[in-house]
Image: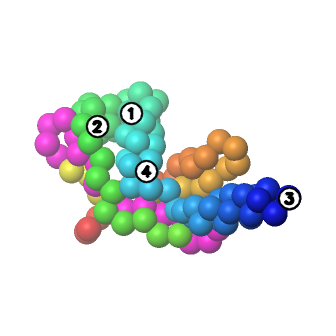
Amino acid sequence: MKRITLLVLFCIVLGACGGRIPSDVKTAKLSKSYFHKYGKKYKETVFYKNSVSKVEVKQTQELQKDVATSFILVSLAEGQEVPAILSLIRKFPLGWRITGWEWVKNP
């Protein structure tokens, strides 16, 4: 009985120690997918004319529990880099989702 109690307590502690912000890899993957779909939907944008080649996450901050912002650099196929700020929200059980983004004029 003691062993089962210790195992359950250990699992709870490990679950509580999980990150409260998305990892850089997860944010980059979400951003690349988001801007690819954004370019298909809005054909007059720079994301339609040039596909996204990679996304580099510079900084991620937690605003409150399950809400975060990230500063990213989106690299386009022609070599241009577009700085942006993303708003992310975690929705259980789906995980992190992008709720909005904004251009950064002077990074």
Q: Residue at x 39, y 55 (%)?
A: 24
Label 3 to label 2, Cα distance in Å?
55 Å
| Mark 4 closeness class: few <14, some 14–19, many ≥20 residues within 10 Å | many
Amino acid on which disc 1 is placed = His
Residue 85: image x %, image y %?
A: 41, 60
Q: Nearer the viewer, residue 4 or 89?
A: 4
Amino acid on which disc 2 is placed = Val
- Name the element at disc 4: helix
> CB of mark 4 within 8 Å of CB of mark 1?
no
Label 4 to label 2, Cα distance in Å?
14 Å
Q: Residue at x 77, y 59 (%)?
A: 3
Residue 65 to residue 79: above or below:
below
Q: Which one is earlier in the sequence, the residue at label 4 or at label 3? A: 3
- Name the element at disc 2: strand
Label 1 to label 2, Cα distance in Å?
7 Å
Label 4 to label 1, Cα distance in Å?
14 Å
Numbered mark located on residue 27 in the image: 4
Circle 1 sits on which residue? Answer: 36
Q: Residue at x 57, y 49 (%)?
A: 96
Select label 3 or label 2 by which is in front.
3
- Name the element at disc 1: helix
Position of the N terminus, as image quadrant, is bottom right
Amino acid on which disc 4 is placed = Thr
The colour scheme used to paint the residues is rainbow
Circle 2 sits on which residue? Answer: 52
Q: Which residues are magenta?
A: 63-80
Say if the magenta span includes residue 100. no
Select label 4 or label 1 by which is in front.
4
Residue 103: image x %, image y %?
A: 36, 57
Q: Can see residue 69?
A: yes
Q: Which one is earlier in the sequence, the residue at label 3 or at label 1? A: 3
Circle 3 sits on which residue? Answer: 1
